[in-house]
Amino acid sequence: MIPTEDASARKREIEEKLKQEQETLSFVRENLEKSDQLTKGMVSILSSFESRLMQLENSIIPVHKQTENLQRLQENVDKTLLCMDHVISYYHVAKDTDRIIREGPTGRLDEYLSCIAKIQKAVEYFQDNNPDSPELNTVKARFEKGKELLEAEFRSLLNRYSKPVPPILILDCISMDEEVEVQEEVVLEHLPETVLQDIICIAGWLTDYGRNQDFMNVYFQIRSTQLDRSIKGLKDHFRKNSASSGILYSPAVQTKRKDTPTKKTPKRPGTIRKAQNLLKQYSQHGLDGKKGGSNLTPLEGKDDALDVEIDSYIHCISAFVRLAQGEYALLTEVIPEHHQKKTFDSLIQEALDNLMLEGDNIVSAARRAIMRHDYSAVLTIFPILRHLKMNKSEFDSTLQGTAASTKNKLPALIASMETIGAKALEEFADSIKNDPDKEYNMPKDGTVHELTSNAILFLQQLLDFHETAGAMLASQESSSSSSSYTSDFNKRLLSSYICKVLGNLQLNLLSKSKVYEDQALSAIFLHNNYNYILKSLEKSDLIQLVTVTQKRAEMSYRELIEQQIGMYQRSWLKVTENLTDRNIPVLLPGSKLKDKERQVIKDKFKGFNDGLEELCKIQKGWAIPDKEQRDFIRHAQKKVVSDAYRAFLHRCANMSFTKNPEKYHKYRPEEVEEMIEKLFDTSA
């Protein structure tokens, strides 16, 4: 059992806790009541706020929507005004641009193009929005007028600033290609830079917006004329300056301009002129028995002009290449890419055709000359043909992309020159063989015939142009394809040709020598000609070309020369045969000569004296131009005659065959030698 005191205490504790809990419960109840009151008040307030907010919303939303509509209307009004201003501006374009369009683009190209752009936009607007409006026709007309004035400005700028290139500047450019040392590169400025930029700008606009290619025709026509005038100006420069001073580059050389490279005067074909003079006179049969080619009178005036024409044509070919290259470089800046080749082809046609026509005229002149048997014409073709072939690769490169008919013009001209040149060579060889044996045409003194000097001189020109001549002959070879034309092949052909000419010449000389009644003079004639041929071959190095196909050529000529010397020496047998021991009596000691024996000795002396005098008189008028050969023949003949004469005098020294020995013993051996020493000396 629980004690009573503990139970009472426990009871009081519980009662106290119960009381506290009841107090707490009362407090909570009071607070709940207050909270309910507050909640009711808040609900009442919120209900009132919601009611007012709904009223406000019902009032504001219509106002907001109305305001938004007003703003949209305002924006539409602004946009409409802007569009109206833009549209109205198209209606005023014609008026606003009238003055600038009428005055043209000169001096204000950028401003003018800006006006054209405005007009173009107006045209596009009316076409899209109002194609039936009269304003469209107005702006269209203004646009066409503006385009016409641009085209006119394009033409005007080209005409005003396109000038022929001065001849001196062209020659500077050509010499820059040929000279090793130049001071600075020569630049051809076809148009001033500012003008060029305007032309490029106009060409670009006409291409992009003008939809018209007529300006390309204008361009090539104007530039073509200037190209042709530049080349003609160079040709006139040659004619004037070369005729007056003989110096092709005289202005540039004399003034020593700082911007001009120092040049050498180009080599003039003087040897060609000399050969032409000789060959022309020979072909015209104007020979009258002169001693040789050295006595022919050059046709200076005519052939100086011919030299100028040759030089002029050669330089005009080089000038065309350089000028055409410059034109193409200029053209690429102005003409659209897909039209450049065609425009360039048209641009160069006039100048190229004139050059080709001039070349054809040279070929035609050569053909006519060959028909007249004037084979010197081929010498005109050689330097031109060589220059054309040397420049063919650059020529082809310059014309790359042009029409086939354009590119084939130079090869056709080269082929024509090679054909006519080969024909001239062959006919010249035949003419050497068939030259008639005319007595009046033979040198009276047995010296070198004009036929020989002309033939050798002609062959020497072939040496100067051996590659061209070899290729010329090779071009006519049907047995070989063009791909097999090597340098060695051409060299062998030329060697064969030269040997053919020399063979024909030898046969003709042998035939001509028979015109002489005196066999000794015939031998001197052949000796002189053979010796002249051999010395000329050796001096000009032709012998090296001859030996390509004839190894013994030099030895053969030496044998022929020795053979003719032997033939000549036989003419002295009628003199020296009087000095032989035949029929000379043998005088015994103490005996005297019989009358018959004395007469034999007298006849021998007389025969020797008469023969010596006759031969010396005749042969003194003969000629051996080569001093070495002349001295050799004299010395050999002196030795033969003098030795025989001395031996004869020695045998007759003790024979008393006459009372007047001085009548028969007219010459001492020294005097005989002096007489022979005067042989072949027309001045003695």
Image (cartoon, rainbow, N blue to C red):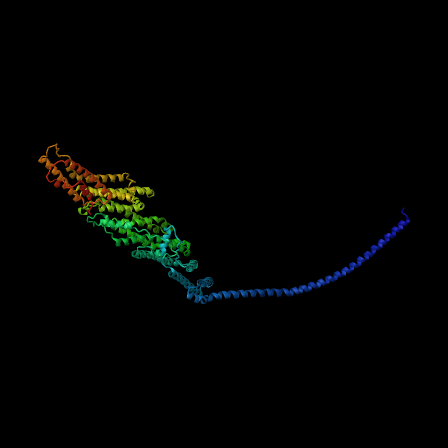
Residue 256, quarter of the rendered image? bottom left
Q: Does residue 478 appear anywhere in the picture?
A: no
The outermost residue toward the right is 4
Q: Looking at the image, which is closer to me, 32 or 571?
A: 571
Position in image of residue 514 (x %, y %): 18, 42
Q: Please indicate whether residue 64 sits to the left or right of residue 172 in the image.
A: right
Position in image of residue 100 (x %, y %): 44, 66
- In this rendering, the answer to whether 313 lies above or below 573 is below
Q: Does residue 534 appear anywhere in the picture?
A: yes
Write the residue at 17% across / 38% down.
646
Q: Looking at the image, which is closer to me, 163 or 614?
A: 614
The outermost residue toward the left is 595
- In this rendering, the answer to whether 665 lies above or below 94 is above
Residue 510, quarter of the rendered image? top left
Write the residue at 67% across / 64% down.
53
Q: Looking at the image, which is closer to me, 427 or 45?
A: 427
Position in image of residue 274 (x %, y %): 26, 50
- In this rendering, the answer to whether 1 lies above or below 139 is above
Position in image of residue 192 (x %, y %): 41, 59
Q: Please indicate whether residue 70 sits to the left or right of residue 130 in the image.
A: right
Q: Please indicate whether residue 91 sits to the left or right of residue 425 in the image.
A: right
